[in-house]
């Protein structure tokens, strides 16, 4: 049966509505169809700007709710997890968009899930998804029928036992955005497994990097084939200026542009040995971005200590602001 299409809406930073075409029909989706849905949605543009990182608990939001399936985005700071749970009568699929997650199933070895490799499951599938790595992660999930119930479990010895109050209903909040009706649902957060401050996340990210001074970065680009990448927003570049020859790749699409396996990669991103040197204004966001690239296998990814401001202060060449 040929499926129709319907628009899954996501709002970008310019407050316009971007549409990613997702197959839709009147029947429940199979796990394989849901895998195609999450992969298509994750590679679309616009939705990433809705994501928030929260240290107190996982952030999640339902971005689309149709008659036969729904789509959720979830962000994961280091140490956050779902706890063991099922999805009621819904089948599902999820894909990591950035970072790495780990899936735990009772009686099985943990499975690392890198970006772009969807996981699928049928009804009553029980698992625990965790971020045990040093960088934040973001994932896209789809369920069919739309997620209506989650049952939580605890390990007692070698047995998974339902919690005393295990079932929870998804609460619905509706709001309008540019004439389009958004349906945003939030379920009760799973029990917190540990809080991590942004300073701890930043410190952990930098511990993985061989960070470069502005002079070292300049030499690496000039003499060793490194690629310099400016992740600052356009408005910030207009105020501060830019570095000649740097690639302009804003943060929300960075992983897709440099993953050698991505259909949206830049021509220069042909293998994992490429040295990518990221910079922002002062060298904070760039550290997290470089660590995220390392999670994709770009083991030489790093950033500039002090960012653009330090580069300028050292008297290295820039293009002045307009």
Image (spheres, rainbow, N blue to C red):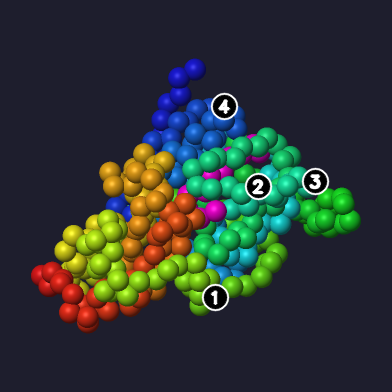
- As for residue 95 lying within the magenta part, the answer is yes
Q: Which residue is mark 2?
A: 111
Quote the CA–CA distance across marks 3 and 4: 33 Å
Does label 2 or label 4 sit earlier along the sequence? Answer: 4
Q: Nearer the viewer, residue 118 or 266?
A: 266
Of residues 136 and 210, which is closer to you in this image?
210
Q: Which mark is residue 200?
A: 1
Q: Give the answer, above or below, for where 82 lies relative to 287.
A: above
Name the chief secondary structure element in magenta: strand
Q: Earlier in the sequence, mark 4 or mark 1?
A: 4
* 295 to the left or right of 187: left
Residue 164 is situated, as x and y percent measured from the top left of the image, at: 84, 57
Q: Secondary structure at mark 1?
A: helix
Any part of residue 8 in sight:
no
Q: Which residues make up the magenta segment?
A: 90-100
**Which disc is residue 27 wearing?**
4
Look at discs 3 and 4 and give the one toward the viewer.
3
Q: CA distance from mark 4 to mark 1?
A: 46 Å
Q: Within 10 Å of the Cα at label 1, are there few (<14), some (14-19), or many (20+) other Cα atoms? A: few
* Residue sitting nearer the eye, 53 or 109: 109
Quote the CA–CA distance across marks 3 and 2. 12 Å
């Amino acid at each position: 049966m040929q499926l129709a299409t319907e628009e899954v809406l996501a709002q970008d930073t310019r407050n316009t509505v971007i549409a990613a075409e997702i197959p839709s029909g009147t029947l429940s989706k199979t796990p394989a169809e849901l895998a195609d849905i999450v992969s298509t949605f994750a590679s679309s543009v616009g939705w990433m700007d809705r994501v928030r990182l929260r240290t107190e608990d996982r952030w999640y939001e339902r971005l689309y709710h149709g008659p036969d399936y729904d789509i959720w985005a979830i962000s994961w700071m280091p140490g956050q997890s779902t706890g063991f749970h099922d999805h009621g009568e819904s089948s599902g699929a999820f894909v990591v968009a950035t970072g790495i997650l780990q899936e735990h199933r009772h009686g099985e070895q943990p499975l690392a899930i890198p970006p772009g490799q969807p996981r699928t499951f049928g009804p009553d599938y029980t698992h625990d998804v965790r971020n045990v790595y040093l960088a934040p992660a973001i994932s896209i999930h789809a369920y069919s029928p739309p997620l209506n119930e989650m049952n939580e479990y605890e390990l007692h010895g070698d047995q998974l036992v339902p919690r005393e109050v295990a079932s929870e209903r998804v609460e619905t909040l509706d709001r309008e955005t540019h004439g389009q009706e958004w349906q945003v649902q939030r379920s009760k957060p799973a029990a917190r497994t540990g809080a991590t401050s942004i300073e701890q996340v930043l410190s952990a990210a930098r511990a993985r990097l061989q960070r470069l001074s502005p002079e070292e970065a300049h030499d690496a680009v000039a003499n060793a084939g490194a690629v310099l990448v400016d992740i600052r927003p356009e408005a910030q570049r207009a105020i501060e200026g830019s570095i000649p020859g740097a690639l302009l790749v804003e943060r929300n699409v960075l992983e897709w542009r440099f993953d050698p396996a991505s259909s949206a990669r830049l021509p220069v991103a042909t293998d994992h040995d490429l040295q990518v040197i990221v910079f922002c204004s002062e060298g904070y966001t760039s550290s997290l971005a470089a660590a995220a690239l390392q999670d994709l296998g770009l083991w030489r990814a790093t950033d500039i200590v002090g960012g653009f401001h330090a580069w300028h202060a050292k008297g290295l060449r820039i293009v002045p602001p307009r």
